Amino acid sequence: MEILFAGSVPPNADSVNILKRVPMKIYNRQSRLLLLTMALLYTSLLPAAPGDLAEADGELAPEQLVAAVLQANPRVEIALAAWQAASARIDQQSTLHAPRFSYGFAPMTIGSRAADFGQRVELSQQLPWPAKLELRGKKAGYEARTQEQTLLSMQLLLATTAKSLFADWYYIHRAIAINHVNQKLLQDFHAIALTRYRTGQTSKQDVLRAEMELTLLQHQDITLKRQRKTIQARINTLLNQAPEQALPAPQQLPLVTDIPDPAQLQLTALQNRQELKAAKARIAAHKTQQKLAELAFIPDLKVSAGYNSLWDNRDKRFNIDIPLDRSRLQAALQEARANARRAHWQEIDLQASIREELQISYDRVQESLHVLQLYRQQITDLADANLAAAVADYRAGKGDFLTLISSEKNRMQTQLQTEQALAELHRRLAGLEQAVGSIQSFTAQQH
């Protein structure tokens, strides 16, 4: 039997899936303890600690943020504790109950001759049918595997959220930078308009329009900085630290030209998705419960040995526990069979949902790739050329100030939309990675 356990992988591995396959009989205590320790040590191997982000020199990389979130977020600890609790139930289910010792005496015989003193001593042990213990251990093992996949699903969700927030963090910094560049540009336009007004080449309206546009950009700058604080608070919440904690500026988001073939992604998703692995574990658990329900018709044994001075002879007995009402056992068997069928069809339904989710995510990424390519290869160059022509015409007295301002606003909007398209591409890539079921970034394949 193969059991999946959490282990550690080095940073920058091809996959951040922290499971290793460990062949073992059911689960033995030493191996399980060792692998639990490895899971707990996993966080110490991550490349960044959340407290280091504010003190880090240079810019924040997306993989740094993901690693810090996986290390610091309490939801990982919650899921890890749930898995540990489920693993601890394996021994409880696969081992015999402790032997029972009982002692009794007859109070009315106290003070009598030793031969007449009434007392009773008994040592007993429940002995369930041998296969039952093994099946109970297996069922608990499958339930632990389900919790293990829940832990990995939580890690993947947090990684996806961190990547999306990194894209937001990148965009808001670029938007503020673009705003500042355009404020400087409008200050230059204001100076040109003021010079032309003083020489009688234009009306005061051009000067006032430049001042109004500059004021609007200053207002936008205030709004953008408030949005930056909002994103900062959301990232810090993921990192389990104060919302106002300072964070480094983001690195440039890498360019992405293409993504893997959808057929290959679908195959990977059906192999990797933690929900499917958990569904398979639930099916195995229900089938094991069905076998247990079938074995419930076989009576368990109870062996006891004791001494009772109130009886003529030493009490040595061998008991068999035979259930008389079998209707309850029959109902339990029917329930187990129904649960197994339900889990089977849930797996089939989940596979269909995963295929749908993957296709939608893939199409959204393709759309973002095309939009970004359109902005970078055509629209941006056109906006730059349009602004350059408008500036030249206005300086030469051939164009009006309204055309100049419109060209500048169009270019700024194009810059913002280009950065927004890049950020949106990375958000959608994070969604596609989640649909595939892997923390591995597709952007790593572009280097």
Image (cartoon, rainbow, N blue to C red):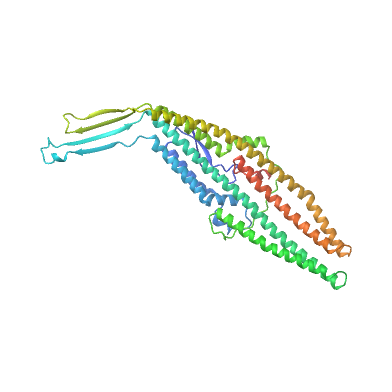
Q: Is residue 156 above or below residue 284?
A: below
The residue lying at 64 percent from left, 42 percent from top is: 432
Question: Horizontal and vertical percent for residue 444?
Answer: 65, 45
The residue lying at 46 percent from left, 31 percent from top is: 336
Q: Is residue 42 above or below residue 337?
A: below
Question: Horizontal and vertical percent for residue 149?
Answer: 52, 40
Split into 4 quadrants, where in the image is the C terminus?
top right
Viewer-side residue, 330 vs 309? 330
Question: Horizontal and vertical percent for residue 356?
Answer: 64, 37
Name the side, left or right, on which 389 lies relative to 127.
Answer: right
The residue lying at 79 percent from left, 60 percent from top is: 408
Viewer-side residue, 64 vs 84? 84
The residue lying at 58 percent from left, 36 percent from top is: 350
| Whether residue 47 can be seen here | no
The quadrant where residue 261 appears: top right
Question: Horizontal and vertical percent for residue 191?
Answer: 80, 69
The quadrant where residue 270 appears: top right
